[in-house]
Amino acid sequence: MVETFAGFRAAEVAGVPVLWQPDARFKTFRVTLHARRPLGATAAARSLLPALLLQGTARDPDRPALARRMESLYGAAVLPLSEKQGETHVLRFTLDSVAGHRVPGQPDLLGDGLALLADLLARPRLAQGGLEAGSFERERRQAADGARAVFNNKGRWAAQRALALACDGEPMAIPEHGDIDAIEALTPAQCEAARRDFLGRGSMFAVAYGDLREDTVQPRVANFLAELPPRETEPLPPPVEPAPRDRRAAVERAHLQQSKLVLVFRLPTDVDASTWAKRGLFCSMLGGGPHSRLFREVREKLSLAYYAHATLDRHKGLLTIHIGLDEGAAERVEEEVRRQVAQLAAGEFTDEEFATARLGILSALQAVDDSIGDRSEFTARQWVLGHDRTPSQHAELYASLERTTIADGAAGLWLDYSYLLAPQTSEGSS
């Protein structure tokens, strides 16, 4: 039975929810399979999978052969990605292709592209007796180098360390790449086990959008899913939510000139779309750009920061403040941030602040339908969060919010951790 979700058609195909929407404004289409598993000790093996799965298949045994096959599909592209969403690890495989009826002979590029996707997922060289040692070692070394390189970007490093300390003992503490030592210790067998785990036990759904023929989506996706291993899906656990506690703090040191302050606030996660909209507006007013309190008050008026912005993680229930500053200003900046949070929660802001923040969000939502990638990502996020709204319906929700709802957006917010990455002292302590 075909229903709708977030403006897309929705049906269960071979036990997997499939969301799709034909749109003749485009000449291409995108299909993405999402497989989700709890974030855990196998993160390193999972993070290496996208690179390994592009090394070749039983039919196309190396990367040049894969490239030739994609060229035969009129330049179709396969984009694998392993990412962290809160305390969930996601393997995404995306097929981007021109619509078959747009090219000579009108080939079935949806079916042929999904057949390539099935080869990569179900019959990779990784599963055919393993990769040659040189290929595996190259990809593992590059992954380890990439994980080490995070330290060279002190803003990213501070954010990673802040989450590791604030969420110690929670899956969220695990970095997206897993761990450098774990990457270096990986074997092809561990990565193959991670592939089987994703496909065999992962919570799956698929999103398709663009120039698609209505009558071809379900049968082609069904053929694709039939090529994958049998599935026994395991449910995803809810995110870990500690009870409010006293603020904790840490100072770490490294070779750098500009200190990095990261404040980790917690929010309840089990709330509806309306509450998250209020939180999104609150976050924008606090640290969403040049219009925000952090930029205008902390950076511009008080000259306490080089940069200051806020991010909201809806999957985990975190509002994180990132600030570049001089070490001596850290205490005052933290006090000022908390004061700005309290003022916004108490309704101490102008109509102009409120309108500017809301207009920015509405403008971004108006552009979502103009991009296959953006609309596909929007729909996938809605599915994961369980928010059945189109971009226009989401915009209507934001447009309906009033000044008094900002207090609702800040409800339940509490500061859990203050992390400062500061320059090494003259004695070289760390």
Image (cartoon, rainbow, N blue to C red):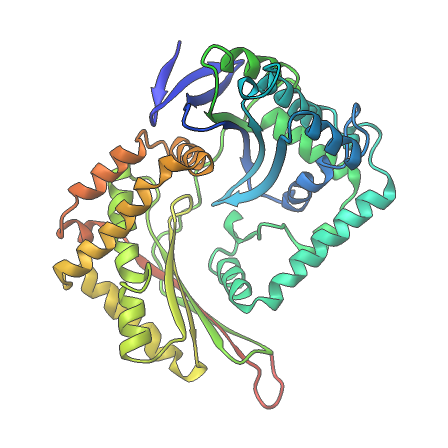
Question: Residue placed farthest to the front in the image?
Answer: 104
Q: Is residue 411 visible?
A: no
Residue at 69 percent of width and 44 percent of height: 48
Residue 321, by quadrant, is: bottom left
Question: Residue 353's x, y, as percent?
Answer: 19, 60
Frontmost residue, 154 versus 342:
154
Residue at 47 percent of width and 21 percent of height: 18
Q: Is residue 87 above or below residue 334?
A: above
Q: Is residue 231 above or below residue 170?
A: above
Q: Is residue 405 visible?
A: yes
Residue at 84 percent of width and 30 percent of height: 129
Residue at 76 percent of width and 46 percent of height: 186
Question: Residue placed farthest to the right in the image?
Answer: 133
Which image quadrant: the C terminus?
Answer: bottom right
Q: Is residue 119 above or below residue 287?
A: above
Which image quadrant: the N terminus?
Answer: top left
**Is residue 365 toward the left or the right of residue 221 in the image?**
left
Question: Residue 255's x, y, as percent?
Answer: 60, 78
Question: Residue 408's x, y, as percent?
Answer: 20, 49
Question: Residue 340's x, y, as percent?
Answer: 24, 67
**Is residue 341 toward the left or the right of residue 314 in the image?**
left
Frontmost residue, 253 versus 30:
30
